Image (tube, rainbow, N blue to C red):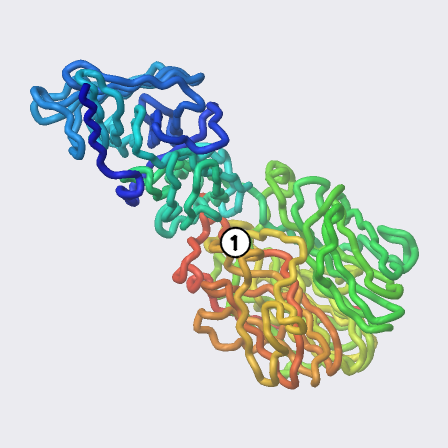
Amino acid sequence: MRLSRVVIGGVGAVVALAAAAVVVTLGPVAHAATAPTAPFDALTVKGTHANPLLPPGESRVFDDSNSTITGGAADTGGIQLSVTAPQGAWSAVVTPPLGGELTVGSTYPTTTVSGDDTHAGFTLTGEGHSCGASSTGTVAIKELVRDGDTVTAFAVSYTYDCSPPSVPIEGEIRYQSQIGYAAGTISPGSIDFGPQDIGQDGTPRTLTYTSLGSEPITIATVAVGADDNVFLIATTCAGQSLAYGQTCTITITPHATVVGPESVDLVVNDNTGNTGRLVPLSLFGKVGAAGTFYPLSPTRILDTRSGTGASKAPIGPGAVLHLAVAGHGGVPATGVGAVVLNVTVTAPSVGGYLTVYPTGTTRPTASSINFPAGWTGANSVTVPLGAGGAVDIFNFAGTAQVIADVVGFYAGNDDLLGTASGLGGQFQTTIPGRLLDTRQGFGALDPHGAVLLSVDFKDAAVNANVKALAVNITAVNPSSGGYLTAWNGVGNPPLASTLNFDPGRVVPNFAIVPTAPCNFAGCSQLPMMGVYNGSPGLTDVLVDLFGFYDNSSLPGGLRFHPLPPTRIVDSRTGLGLAAAIPSNGTVAIDAPGTVADNNTFALQFNLTAVNPTSSTYLTVWPAGLGLDRPVVSNLDPAIHQTVSNAVVTLVGNTNGFQIYNLRGTTNVVIDVNGSFQTGVAPGGASGLAPNTASRTRRLDPAPGGTARLAPFA
């Protein structure tokens, strides 16, 4: 008896990587805990787009651990393999060209069934399904052993264009073979994310890639196509080699950009064939409310001095006050993702800080407002709502009276659509600019006087749709202690403070101020705000603009993504910045991936100056966009003071921003509480794609303004 064995290649000898596409889903058949060993019986089917054999993206890997596999000779000198598995029966038949024979080392183009003079025949059926008569492909004969007319072993690699034109199915066929093979599955084989709000990151889903062949899988790249921003990828797979049973993961975050369906193939290039594995991804974009802003007239919801919103007592050392926010002060009971609070501390017994964070979450390593003993001051705090629609306020040391005024909120879902609240506004950025400096020929505000400020964006369509301004308001050298209140300028100012000051100090605070149509002569219905001096003395006032909120009718808008306070910079420890900022110095900071991604255009954070060696001011502006340092200030610390202020800043194309320090040296701490990402343009498209050109287009110049004194009794 004569045995003839001819073998060509091994799995390591043929590694073809391409940028085409193929997908796989782990079927319900269990596999062995250890890798297959020679001789190998196997059938692998690496799926692709929709075809008669498998759903889109699904694949199969059958071996002796999960199936019954038989093989042998077929008619006219061919070979065949049969698989019986819980999923159903599979069959593969290869026949030589008419009048010829299958030769090891040869690759044949194929037609279905019996082939012809120039084509081998190849037919693959599975689970009750078969391909059409026009199916074409290739078979590569790697091993073929005969004992007379009996076929005792074979190894074949195949491609099968089951429903041309398409990306072909690929796979391996083994019967009592000595040649190994690489195979694997991706589970799930496709993901439909369903309805997704345009411009918002949806809930991530994770794919698991499992190696199931006798040889390792080598993964070259994982991608969804160049500049694709609809499905964002984080993966441990790229560049990995996976032995049998090993896995890697691919996490997909959907980010709809237009109303209607969007789809793309995730492509995983590996050594299991000539084309990449495809995982079809899809979603349906819709206009939702999440991330839009709803301004409110400042309303007090907490005052520990009077018992408003909590017990009538200061917050003690290491204590946490639970503040109910949803359903209070104009904040709806449902549908709210984050709120904007103006938090004021008064009469602290020792120096310390407060941290405001969502109820029911772990208190972060971050501060929301810093203060010395005996100080009265405020800071704007944007914070996600936690359990029960509440936030927690932690006091580090001593006792402190705390006041909170709610000035607005961001939608967390679509609950507010169809209600009186409707759709909120998107954030529009401008180059930072100074709207008002009463020191420049205007004159300090009188005791209990106010200034009404109209703002002209040089575009009638913009002016008509401004609903709130994002500004930094600074009291400069007041002659006595007191406070400023910012409001829309209509009627009397509300019973709430925007910032508090002591005589002779420079005190800023960030504020989101609702606007109203201008009601004094010569302002032509421009958006208007007011600043009231609630002190018995004079004070100069600065107003610096950093952006505005519209009614979601303007192009280029952004939506807010809240975060629990997240520390990204602490120059005292070297976190994010190696040392203190020097005198007349500028530092550049790139926000890490924990708080910013490819769709981030602006950040909101709490900036703290720690123990400056001289009284100074800090200015924040985007890096990498070719902008000169703007004539604005974000924080004005006195010598040796530790003080905070909220900041909203554009970021450059590496999510970078810059900080300038006028004099002395100062350490800084930055705690991020959210990002602004691509919003929805009129007509239901994503506002702007995250690329260099769009970031530049978003930089509208700062508008001009006119001011008028308005005394109040």
Q: Quadrant of the N terminus?
A: top left
Relative side of 246 to 70, left or right: right
Q: Residue at x 63, y 40 (%)?
A: 416
Can residue 567 be spotted in the picture? yes
| 217 vs 564: above or below | above
Residue at the right extreme of this rendering: 312
Relative side of 34 to 100, left or right: right
Q: Residue at x 82, y 63 (%)?
A: 396
**Quadrant in the rendering for residue 476:** bottom right
Three-letter code, disc 1: Gln
| 489 vs 153: above or below | below
The residue that label 1 is drawn on is: 677
Can residue 112 be spotted in the picture? no
Q: Residues within 10 Å of mark 1 (few under 14, many from 20)?
A: many
Relative side of 702 to 537, left or right: left
**Quadrant in the rendering for residue 24:** top left
Residue at the front extreme of this rendering: 1
Q: Quadrant of the C terminus?
A: bottom right
